[in-house]
Amino acid sequence: MKQRLSLQNIIGMSFMTFALFLGAGNLIFPPLAGQLAGTQVWLAAAGFLITGVGLPLLAVIMVSRVGGRFNDISRELPRSLIVLMGCCIYTIVVPIYGAPRTGLVAYEIGVIPFLKEPDAISRLIYSITFFGISWYLSLYPGKLLESVGKIITPALILLLIILGIAPIISPLGEAGEPMNDYAGNAFVRGFLEGYMTMDALAALLFSIVIITNLKSHGITSPNALVRHSIITGCIAACGLALVYLSLFNLGTTSRDIIQHPQNGGQILSAYVSNLFGHYGNVLLATVVSLACLTTSIGLITAASEYFCELSKKLNYKVLVAVISISCMMFANLGLNQIIELFIPVLLILYPVCIALILLGLIRDLMPNPQLVYRATLFVTFLLSLVDASKGLNHPLADELLEPFKALPGHDFNLSWVIPFVITIALTCLAGRFTRSPSPAHEDQA
């Protein structure tokens, strides 16, 4: 008997997936990139869509194919390394950076415009409220389809449609000349800007939430899980792409409204305020709060489920509470400070994440998957460290990094790309003459 979701549940799952991904970074980075790209906006948007839409979609498909759990993604690695990598990614992306950023963006864009004198106390009160709601809605992950996919997301989509159409009907400016690095490398800059959304990393986390919800609605066979993951993922990806393109368009026509903004949130606030006045601020506050809330819920849920899988001694509800409290604490840092602080971390994590996604998709074609995975991930991690270390400005670091400057893409923090491809090719060739042993931990992962 074929397992199928009803059309209503497919739409609900797609809405839920869309809402999980549409969070803080998705709203604040495209407008700034669009303003800086100017007349090169669509070239920058094309690069952004690769890392901001394409990779997350591939990640959802890949995770559903390998079993729906994070530890299944890299089972060719030693068990201890898999656990360490998973713990690092989940800890950094959820309680330390990703989820706290959702609260910060919601506060700065959705609350500050209505306060006469925003201060640390108001931010603390808001973060307690925001992550209190996130905590409550994260307690029942199997019901996310009802609470997010069928209730919150339709309202969010309606508001985004208004926000996306307005700059087309009533533009407030024209695109200017490209600025900074966008002048000569708009596509590459857009590609790297997509890192900042963290959607590819989030996809590895959210896939667990998606699979959990599919199973709670009777979809349990591997083929059915993959099929429904592809359907819901593609619908959500189309929605994300439309949102990004509309925000890029908004940003590229915003120079007459606000010049030299510190982040895209300021562009959004200024644009909507000029276009709609006070009602525009209310509209934007609602959009941002809903978008950030759904992402926060998804991140907290995914992290709690992952750590519960590692040990049966851990209690899901306790973990949700602990992670929510941690998010609240880190959310009381400034938005610009937390973004700057974690740029080097993203330069390390993102290439490894991209490598995991692409390797997972071609795993069945590898003669010796263990050899390919271990060698490729090692090379990718090493060169991502090189890219992340360029800002140290220390004589010893400069001397050690000097040989790597000859690598293609070094100036754009893409030193890992060519070695990544070469390592896959060489290890696949070598794998024809070696046999891949079954990982000892495969049944335990």
Image (tube, rainbow, N blue to C red):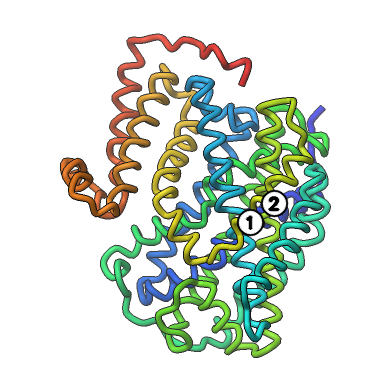
Q: Is residue 50 left or right of residue 410?
A: right
Image quadrant where one finds the C terminus: top right
The residue pinned by badge 2 equals 325
Q: Is residue 355 left or right of residue 424?
A: right
Which residue is more in the foreground, 272 or 421? Answer: 272
Residue at the spot 46% in from the left edge and 52% down from the top edge = 51
Contact, mark 2 vs mark 1 (Cβ under 8 Å): yes
Residue at the spot 40% in from the left edge and 24% down from the top edge = 374
**Above or below: residue 414 compared with residue 375:** below
- The Cα atoms of the two marked residues, 2 and 1, are separated by 6 Å
Residue at the spot 78% in from the left edge and 49% down from the top edge = 144
Number of the label disc, if any, that sits on residue 106: none
Which residue is more in the foreground, 85 or 318? Answer: 318
The amino acid type found where label 2 is placed reads: Ile
The residue pinned by badge 1 equals 329
Q: Which secondary structure, mark 2?
A: helix
Q: Residue 116's spot in the image, x, y percent?
A: 65, 86
